[in-house]
Amino acid sequence: MRFLVARTSSFRDREPWGENVDVVDELRSVEVRGGQVPAWLRPVVHRWIAFSYALKLLWRSRLYDAISVGRQGVWLPILLRLFGSSKRIVMTDVEWPRWGTGIINCVAGNAASAICCNTHVEMERYSRTYKVPAEKFRFVPMAFQKPDMRETSDGGYIFAGGNQARDWRTFFEAVGELPYPVRCFTTQGGLPRVPPNVTIASVAREEFYNQMAAASCVVVPVVKEPLRVTGPTTWINAMGMGKVVIVTEPEGAADYMESGVSGFYVNHGDAEALRECVVMVMQDGELRKRVGEAARKRAETEFSPEVFRRRVLWLLEAGLDGKGGSA
């Protein structure tokens, strides 16, 4: 058997998948090209680039027994079925917002053989919203990225960062006036009033993870979204480095950490609970060491690139050699 796998936005690992697997770079094929045009043209140009990318994959698909695509390959399952192909196709890196692509997501999801989701709650939401059978969805946790891993230290400050659906209002309310420096890394505009102990900066990816590696704890404050769960890339990379993570996402985070054991999570928008958790972690160095080490061990066991590759390859092989079931 031979497989084609897309390297995607949330899985940048360049390590080989195996002798029978070829890798296509979805990042370079779609996202990098789409970012090279003026901003006002990007929505239209991006749609055309994604469609032409799927056409190229359709032509290449004749060489493979099964194919895995990322979020930019959403047209491929549709094209395969339109051309009468029953070839197995697995969708990964799924990030479906409520707006904009509902019909395409519905048709693509029903045409796919399996759909990988990063959390169980997304599986239920996507199935219900886009009318895709629940049995098509598989829980495949996101992997930490080895290039983002760093040697760590405990620098005495609180780290927070990210741009997608971050709840800075709740975060600033929670950490304001605490006796700890807070370093916040984001390009998100329209921030609420910034407390005196908080600094805001925009840095490149490498420096972002340098700062994360030296923090005493990592906070991922996110708003509750109707479908997707935001923030896993940040908290999984932090766990991979053995950092204590505090997340305001009780539904998605529960798939990755046991609260109080390998991380912490509180309810969306609960500034008081977030503040209490931050203070508890910052006051207890032994707690940080214990929870951080548990986070690192769980990440290595369940969320490593090697484990992610095995899960996706299993789904590609399923049905081709009599296998079935859950990833």
Image (tube, helix red, strand yellow):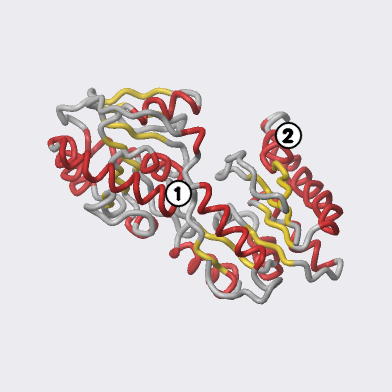
- Dot 1 falls on a residue whose secondary structure is loop
Residue 186 vertical placement versus 87 (above, below): above
Query: Of the residues shown, which amino acid type is indicated by label 1?
Result: Thr
Is residue 217 positioned above or below 296 on the image?
Answer: above
Residue that numbered label 1 is attached to? 230
**Which residue is label 2 attached to?**
33
Give the spatial CA distance, label 2 vs label 1. 24 Å
Whichever of callouts 2 and 1 sits on the residue coming sooner in the sequence is: 2
Report the front residue among 187 and 58.
Answer: 58
Name the side, left or right, on which 252 lies relative to 69: left
Q: Residue furthest front?
A: 19
Q: Nearer the viewer, residue 210 or 312?
A: 312
Residue 287 falls left or right of residue 292: left
Residue 32 lies, in percent from the top left, at 68, 34
Q: x, y (%) of residue 266?
A: 26, 52
Q: Residue at x 69, y 51 (%)?
A: 5
Q: Residue at x 19, y 49 (%)?
A: 273
Q: Amino acid at mark 2?
A: Arg
Residue 250 position, x and y percent, is 32, 57
